[in-house]
């Protein structure tokens, strides 16, 4: 299951223009403030407002009416061509316009033990659901000290960047973006470029497990990493007894992953990145058909594989936690909200309330990472208000799903 994440690529010219505009706006604001405080300061020549010029021209051409049809169709054609070009870079598709996720480049070579790699570092980005998986398993297993983490944030060009956070985090339990604590790089592409085995020209994706001593990318496939965190570092884990992939459940875990990954985890992206109506229709039907199946299953089962939390649940959770705040709106997964599924939403709250899981869910970073960065899907970069059902207080309400486990055990005893 690929952990490749995608962000739009803007040209250097576009980026530099945006930066210059930002600097100009900041300067203009500074000058305006000083002028208001000291009216005797002489005013220089005032630059015309571009919006005023545009408004004047349009009024002269067609008054209060809408622009003529020819102009609208021309702009529509130009925008569609530009959109197709950007989407081809953001989300590669097949001939039908259906999104095809690229495979991860660096897979974990098993057995991967402490003897051949004693020092590891994890790179993540908070908006990415694939990276979120690794943070949850790392937290549940108690591997925070054994595997330090560096958290990147998406830059305007879609690359993962590291920043020195000057404003203090109000809630120290919530993970926030920061600097590269292992290599001191400015961006994740720079870390990939440090490989002793040679540079890397592909996409610098998260999550990425870095071998500090070998200076090599150990893995950038999310499922490989969470399997390794679950069983490969028990000697360093504070919670070594937790097994999220017990042998007796491996078959069920693989079965659920085989359903959830293509239709839900990747299914939401197939909806959002579809480049044809047919591709979207196929993806959205598969998504909501699968959600209905899982909803029915969770009516009698606390977790996907019964009473035991597994890696399959972790993989589903990171998509569900983003569903109503991102995928329902931005990715056109609009048939139903997650909160309309009582069992799925209770299941979501059950996992959210597990110790240390809520700390991996930075909702502001998640929303910014989609609405403010995925330019082809949201050109205005306007971020909507967070739905009330997705706030921490709502997710902390009682879920009562433990009763399912007790009911199942009671039934088993009485039958036997």
Image: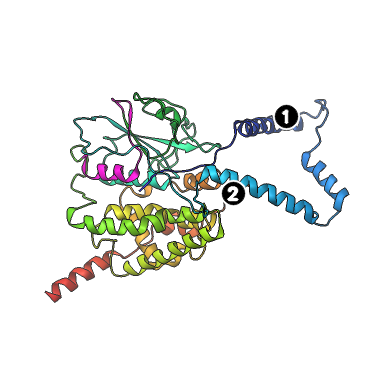
Identify the element where label 2 is drawn. loop
Determine which of the numbered discs, if any, sits on residue 378 in the image. 2
- The total number of labels drawn is 2
Pick the residue in front: 4 or 369.
Answer: 4
| Picture quadrant of residue 127 | top left
Query: Can you give x and y, in whole percent of width and height, for residue 186 in the image?
Result: 47, 27
For the view shown, which residue lies furthest in the bottom direction?
415
Quarter of the picture holding the C terminus: bottom left
| 1 vs 2, front mark | 2
Residue at point 32%, 57% (across, down): 258
Q: Is residue 199 above or below residue 109?
A: above
- Tag 1 near tag 2, CB within 8 Å: no
Residue at point 49%, 59% (across, down): 388
Residue matched to label 1: 31
Residue at point 47%, 54% (across, down): 270
Query: Can you give x and y, in whole percent of width and height, for residue 184 in the image?
Result: 41, 25
Mark nearer the N terminus (1 vs 2): 1
Q: Which residues are magenta?
A: 212-233
- Assess whether residue 361 is covered by the magenta stretch: no
């Amino acid at each position: 299951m690929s952990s490749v994440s995608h962000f739009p690529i803007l040209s250097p010219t576009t980026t530099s223009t945006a930066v210059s505009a930002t600097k100009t706006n900041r300067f203009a604001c500074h000058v305006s403030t000083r002028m208001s405080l000291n009216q005797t300061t002489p005013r220089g020549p005032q630059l015309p407002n571009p919006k005023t010029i545009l408004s004047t021209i349009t009024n002269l051409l067609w008054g209060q009416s809408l622009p003529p049809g020819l102009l609208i169709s021309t702009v529509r054609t130009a925008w569609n061509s530009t959109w197709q070009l950007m989407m081809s870079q953001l989300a590669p598709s097949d001939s039908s316009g259906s999104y095809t996720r690229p495979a991860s480049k660096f897979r974990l070579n098993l057995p991967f033990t402490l003897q051949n790699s004693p020092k590891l570092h994890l790179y993540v980005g908070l908006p990415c659901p694939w990276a979120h998986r690794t943070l949850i398993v790392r937290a549940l297993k108690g591997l925070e000290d054994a595997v330090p983490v560096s958290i990147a944030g998406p830059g305007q060009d879609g690359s993962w960047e590291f920043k020195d956070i000057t404003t203090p985090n109000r809630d120290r339990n919530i993970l926030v973006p920061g600097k590269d604590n292992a290599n001191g790089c400015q961006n994740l592409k720079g870390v990939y470029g440090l490989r002793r085995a040679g540079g890397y020209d592909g996409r610098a994706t998260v999550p990425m497990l870095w071998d500090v001593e070998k200076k090599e990318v150990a893995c950038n496939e999310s499922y490989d990493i969470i399997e390794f965190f679950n069983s490969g570092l028990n000697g360093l884990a504070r919670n070594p007894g937790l097994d999220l992939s017990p042998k007796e459940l491996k078959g069920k875990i693989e079965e659920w992953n085989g359903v959830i990954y293509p239709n839900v985890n990747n299914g939401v992206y197939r909806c959002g990145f579809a480049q044809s109506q047919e591709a979207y229709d196929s993806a959205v039907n598969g998504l909501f058909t699968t959600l209905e199946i899982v909803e029915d299953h969770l009516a009698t089962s606390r977790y996907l594989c019964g009473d035991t939390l597994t890696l399959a649940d972790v993989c589903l959770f990171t998509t569900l936690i983003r569903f109503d705040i991102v995928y329902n709106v931005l990715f056109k997964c609009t048939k139903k909200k997650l909160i309309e599924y009582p069992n799925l939403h209770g299941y979501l709250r059950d996992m959210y309330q597990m110790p240390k899981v809520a700390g991996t869910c930075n909702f502001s970073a998640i929303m910014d990472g989609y609405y403010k960065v995925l330019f082809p899907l949201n050109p205005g970069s306007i971020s909507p208000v967070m739905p009330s059902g997705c706030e921490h207080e709502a997710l902390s309400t009682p879920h009562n799903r433990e009763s399912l486990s007790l009911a199942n055990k009671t039934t088993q005893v009485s039958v036997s």
